[in-house]
Amino acid sequence: MSSLEKMEYPRKLLDYMDGFAVSKTIFTACELGVFDLLHEVQEPISAVAIASRLSTSVDGMERLLDACVGLELLKVDLKTSEGKEKVSMKGLLVYLQKNHLKRCTGKLSEEEMLTFIHFMDSIWNICGKDVIQAFDFSIFHTVYDLGGCSGGLAKQFVSTYKESTVTIMDMPKVVQTAKKHFITESEQQIHFLEGDFFNDPIPEADLYIMARIIHDWTEEKCLSLLRKIYQSCRPGGGVLIVEALLNEDRSGPVHSQLFSLKMLVQTEGKERMPSEYTKLLTDAGFRDIECKVTGKLYDAILGRK
């Protein structure tokens, strides 16, 4: 593969990349006794009840069950008076190899960070164009990509909107790595600002991009950050959130459900439904919220000031 940009969307390759997470999901459900419990009760049972019986967190169990539904190992019935899900058996899995999920701990070395940034950058070669074309951003000339890492999405943006400039705001080590390995001097529409967007001032701009940022954090932190962005955003400006959307009925997509499980063990965040992003943005002050499913790994949510 000489250039991912010249490839068609490699859905099968990306599906195969999820294979490890699929196996871990099945192994974890088996280790916890989810399938054994459902086989034992022989009737629909809520996620809250399953979590209680198996001594797990409700949030973690809901995400695990959602992923099992997406993988068609279980089926879901949302018809309850409290709006909580009920899960019933579709197939009993036995004799599966035991395994354990690992937590992401510790700081990345320089080599590990470079590997991680290469991975993040390559994703935008595959999905970035679809995200940028989800809405018309031609009226936004001053753009800040918060946590923009390598500048992969910024490159897609300026190649489409040549009148715009994008400033990537990220931690100093990330910025230094991106400048050294990913952004050339010829890319004059892309600039960098070292800083922590939670603690440092966010400069005024027409548009703020947050790609794969919101899913790392709790509702409280997300709302605090979005309110901070709203204060810096120029009138008529907006915020673009790029994440993997979950279906409103929690039936999928599988890759979003698996992402949410990964967030459970790697961060304090989760993947969300369009209604959840709409509420976050509305509570922060934004209006005219639009959610676009791209059909690729990542979707687009736009809010206006």
Image (cartoon, helix red, strand yellow):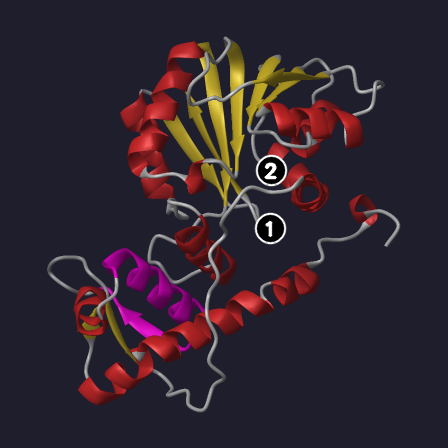
- Using the rendered image of the protein, determine whether residue 284 is visible from the camera's viewpoint: yes
Marks counted in the figure total 2
Mark number displayed over residue 26: none
Q: Position of residue 282 (x, y in %)?
A: 30, 27
Vertically, is 298 above or below 252? above
Residue of label 1:
296
- Using the rendered image of the protein, determine whether residue 137 is visible from the camera's viewpoint: no
Q: Which amino acid type corresponds to the residue marked 2 in the rendered image?
A: Val
Q: Residue furthest right?
A: 2
Name the residue: 39% across, 38% down: 217
Q: Is residue 68 magenta?
A: yes
Report the front residue among 161 and 42.
42
What SS does tag 1 mark? Answer: loop
Q: Residues within 10 Å of mark 2 (few under 14, many from 20)?
A: many
Separation (CA) of disc 1 from disc 2: 9 Å
What SS does tag 2 mark? Answer: helix
Name the residue: 38% across, 44% down: 269
In the picture, the quarter occupied by the N terminus is: bottom right
Report the front residue among 114 and 119.
114
Q: Which amino acid type corresponds to the residue marked 1 in the rendered image?
A: Lys
Q: Position of residue 165 (x, y in %)?
A: 67, 15
Q: Position of residue 205 (x, y in %)?
A: 53, 11
Residue of label 2:
131
Name the residue: 66% across, 39% down: 128
Q: Are marks 1 and 2 in contact (CB under 8 Å)?
A: yes
Q: Quadrant of residue 265?
A: bottom left
Q: Position of residue 5 (x, y in %)?
A: 79, 44
Question: Which span of residues is magenta-colored?
Answer: 57-78
Whichever of labels 1 and 2 marks the residue nearer the N terminus, that label is 2
